[in-house]
Image (cartoon, helix red, strand yellow):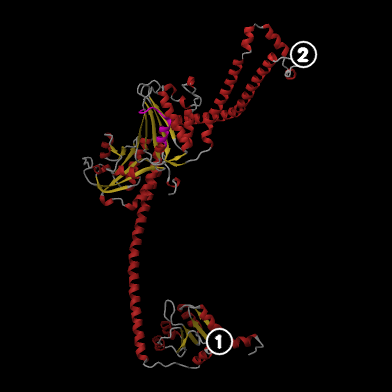
């Protein structure tokens, strides 16, 4: 049909029958669209809900409906469509299910008919027009199928009701859990706010004793508890010393210098060992009962929490808070309380730094001085070494030249010279004399000086042994300078750090040194972890230390060197001790031994670089080296090396 105007074409399109196709298969919808477009207005929906909405808005003249749809069957959708479409609007099932049961259920549910997939392309349009013209398929005994369908609907509704009931119960449970979480968050917020006020109140206090006293009082006031205490870790990390406490029991314990061992028997001890908060629901004050000891200082049972005071992973002590069981802290409170404890630990650390400022400053000056000396010495010896390197070659050449001169002199004195012939070396000597004159050397004056001296003096001045001795001195000095350069700079030139067993390295070193049997005694802990560093540098460090210890024992009737290796109190380090029973190092030179070129064995060829090089190599491996010595009681050198982390271990 041709159109001469846009309005007439639009009117013709509007007059076409509207067909709604509901099928979740896009290929099936595309096929129906191609077969019907041009003669019908084809509307499409890929799911039942959208199909229902589209039917309600467009009021189609016919609905082509797949039986098996997601979330809702085509039969259920047909029931809904009949309630929103005009009576008599045909709904036709399009399905690949050819069973008689499916066809009967569709017709019983009110479908006008059933078309089978795959669609018959040649007759499909004709079949659609037939249903539009009033065709209806008849189902014998439709009442029986209708009752069966209604029974299925009831069963599905019952199952859905159970599902909704379960969801309601689940939502009720989740609501209760959410309320618990909300209550916990509100409690944590209050704890964080109280902790923030405590932290703010103590940050300006720099005196350690005042800080500890103020902390326990402010803490008790903010949290509404009447008892708290602060333990600080002893220098050897084996004891917890009570340094502040609130209330009469705390005052008496402070007066008696109350201490707890760092072990698993007490709540504060466990907090240190595990580095995490510990909670007990019924203990006397300050953790005493957790040791199995009752105390009259705390007659009533309390709930207690012990919080480790950690500064950058290092334990400084423990904060304990006690309360009535009804006000007990919970596991969920640990995060908020630990945050406050970390702030307290930071304040304690600052106060300790202030108290130790003078000692720390002296140590810093000492360390920086040694480092500056080592750096300056290294640069100087590097420069000197570069200048000394050519000396060895020059000495060799001069030595050969002197020997050749001697050979020339011998030939001049002993070779017979033919009549009216020159000696073959005469021209060589004349060339030397010319070169000497060009160099400004007054050869005649030297001859006069030698002639004026006695034969004995001439022998002393022109001694070949003296010349060779001087050359040997120059050569030895140059070799010493280059050796010092290598000892000082060489170990740091190329480092290859890795994880390795320090005990195995020491056992190999001791065996290779060949010291007399029975001199060296070792004590290696069984649980020593691998260390991380350059094995070559570490071997040189201990080689120097053991060698120094052996040299210090010269002349001793019963020389002993004791080497121990064990994990350090700081869990990330291993501590090694090299101890001798020698005369010890005098106090007046104990600081000087670390300085480059300082040595007490100059007549034995010492360069004074061994300990300064050890100090530098240990520092390069992120460790620490120090010494303790008393006259007549021997000397101990301590080496602290870092433990190998998991990411530095080789893969198996």
Assess whether residue 508 is covered by the magenta stretch.
Answer: yes
The picture places residue 158, in percent across and down from the top left corner, at 33, 78
Residue at screen point 45% across, 79% down: 48
On residue 419, the disc is 2
Packing grade of label 1 (10 A; few <14, some 14-19, many >=20) is some
Out of 209 and 257, give the one closest to the viewer.
257
Q: Tell me which numbered mark, 1 or 2, is placed earlier along the sequence.
A: 1
Q: Does residue 436 appear anywhere in the picture? A: no
Query: Label 1, label 2: how many angstroms apart (C-alpha)?
Result: 142 Å
Out of 186 and 314, give the one closest to the viewer.
314
Principal secondary structure, stretch drawn in magenta:
helix
Looking at the figure, which quarter contains the N terminus? bottom right
* Quadrant in which residue 438 is drawn: top right
- In the image, residue 518 sits, relative to residue 181, either above or below, namely above
The picture places residue 29, in percent across and down from the top left corner, at 52, 81
The picture places residue 477, in percent across and down from the top left corner, at 56, 23
The picture places residue 570, in percent across and down from the top left corner, at 38, 39
* Quadrant in which residue 171 is drawn: bottom left
Marks 1 and 2 close (CB-CB < 8 Å): no
**Segment colored magenta:** 505-518
Q: Residue furthest right?
A: 420
- Residue behind mark 1: 40
- In the image, residue 598 sits, relative to residue 464, either above or below, namely below
Residue at screen point 66% across, 7% down: 453
Identify the secondary structure beneath mark 2.
Answer: loop
Residue at screen point 34% across, 87% down: 147
- In the image, residue 228 sits, relative to residue 371, either above or below, namely below
On residue 630, the disc is none
Left or right? Give the position of 625 relative to 374. left
Identify the secondary structure beneath mark 1.
Answer: loop
Q: Does residue 22 appear anywhere in the picture? A: yes
Assess whether residue 517 is covered by the magenta stretch.
Answer: yes
């Amino acid at each position: 049909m041709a159109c001469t105007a846009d309005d007439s074409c639009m009117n013709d399109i509007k007059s076409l029958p509207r067909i709604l196709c509901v099928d979740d298969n896009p290929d099936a919808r595309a096929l129906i669209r191609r077969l019907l477009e041009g003669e019908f207005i084809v509307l499409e929906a890929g799911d039942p809900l959208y199909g229902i909405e589209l039917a309600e808005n467009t009021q189609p003249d016919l609905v082509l409906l797949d039986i098996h749809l997601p979330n809702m069957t085509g039969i259920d959708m047909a029931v809904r469509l009949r309630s929103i479409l005009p009576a008599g609007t045909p709904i036709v099932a399009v399905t690949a299910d050819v069973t008689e049961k499916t066809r009967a259920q569709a017709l019983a549910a009110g479908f006008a008919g059933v078309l089978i997939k795959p669609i018959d392309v040649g007759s499909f349009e004709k079949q659609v027009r037939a249903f539009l013209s009033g065709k209806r398929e008849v189902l014998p005994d439709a009442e029986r199928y209708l009752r069966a369908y209604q029974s299925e609907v009831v069963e599905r509704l019952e199952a859905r009701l159970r599902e909704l009931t379960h969801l309601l119960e689940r939502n009720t449970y989740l609501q209760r859990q959410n309320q618990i979480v909300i209550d916990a968050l509100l409690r944590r917020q209050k704890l964080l706010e109280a902790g923030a006020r405590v932290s703010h109140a103590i940050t300006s206090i720099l005196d350690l004793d005042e800080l500890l006293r103020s902390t326990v009082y402010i803490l008790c006031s903010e949290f509404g508890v009447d008892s708290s205490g602060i333990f600080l870790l002893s220098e050897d990390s084996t004891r917890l010393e009570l340094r502040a406490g609130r209330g009469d029991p705390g005052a008496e314990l402070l007066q008696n210098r109350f201490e707890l061992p760092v072990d698993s028997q007490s709540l504060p001890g466990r907090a240190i060992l595990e580095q995490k908060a510990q909670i007990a629901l019924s203990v006397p004050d300050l953790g005493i009962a957790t040791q199995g000891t009752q105390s009259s200082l705390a007659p009533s049972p309390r709930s207690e929490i012990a919080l480790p005071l950690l500064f950058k992973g290092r334990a400084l002590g423990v904060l304990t808070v006690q309360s009535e069981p009804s006000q007990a802290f919970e596991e969920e409170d640990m995060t908020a309380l630990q945050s406050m404890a970390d702030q307290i630990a930071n304040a304690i650390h600052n106060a300790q730094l202030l108290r130790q400022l003078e000692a720390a400053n002296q140590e810093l000056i000492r360390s920086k001085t040694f480092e500056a000396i080592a750096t300056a010495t290294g640069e100087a010896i590097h420069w000197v070494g570069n200048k000394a390197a050519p000396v060895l070659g020059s000495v060799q050449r001069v030595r050969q030249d002197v020997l050749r001169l001697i050979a020339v002199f011998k030939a001049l004195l002993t070779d017979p010279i033919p009549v009216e012939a020159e000696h073959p070396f005469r021209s060589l000597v004349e060339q030397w004399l010319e070169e000497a004159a060009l160099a400004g050397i007054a050869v005649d004056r030297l001859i006069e000086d030698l002639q004026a001296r006695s034969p004995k003096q001439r022998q002393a001045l022109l001694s070949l042994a003296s010349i060779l001795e001087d050359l040997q001195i120059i050569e030895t000095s140059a070799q010493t300078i280059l050796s010092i350069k290598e000892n000082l700079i060489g170990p740091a030139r190329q480092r290859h750090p890795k994880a390795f067993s320090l005990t195995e390295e020491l056992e190999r070193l001791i065996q290779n040194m060949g010291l007399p049997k029975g001199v060296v005694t070792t004590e290696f802990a069984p649980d020593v972890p691998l260390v991380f560093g350059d094995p070559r540098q570490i071997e040189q460090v201990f080689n120097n230390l053991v060698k120094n210890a052996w040299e210090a024992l010269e002349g001793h009737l019963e020389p002993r060197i004791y080497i121990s290796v064990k994990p350090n109190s700081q869990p990330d380090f291993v501590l090694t001790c090299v101890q001798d029973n020698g005369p010890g190092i005098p106090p007046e030179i104990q600081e000087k031994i670390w300085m480059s070129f300082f040595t007490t064995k100059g007549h034995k060829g010492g360069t004074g670089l061994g300990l300064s090089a050890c100090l530098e190599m240990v520092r390069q491996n992120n460790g620490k080296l120090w010494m303790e010595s008393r006259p007549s009681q021997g000397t101990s050198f301590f080496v602290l090396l870092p433990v190998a982390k998991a990411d530095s271990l080789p893969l198996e």
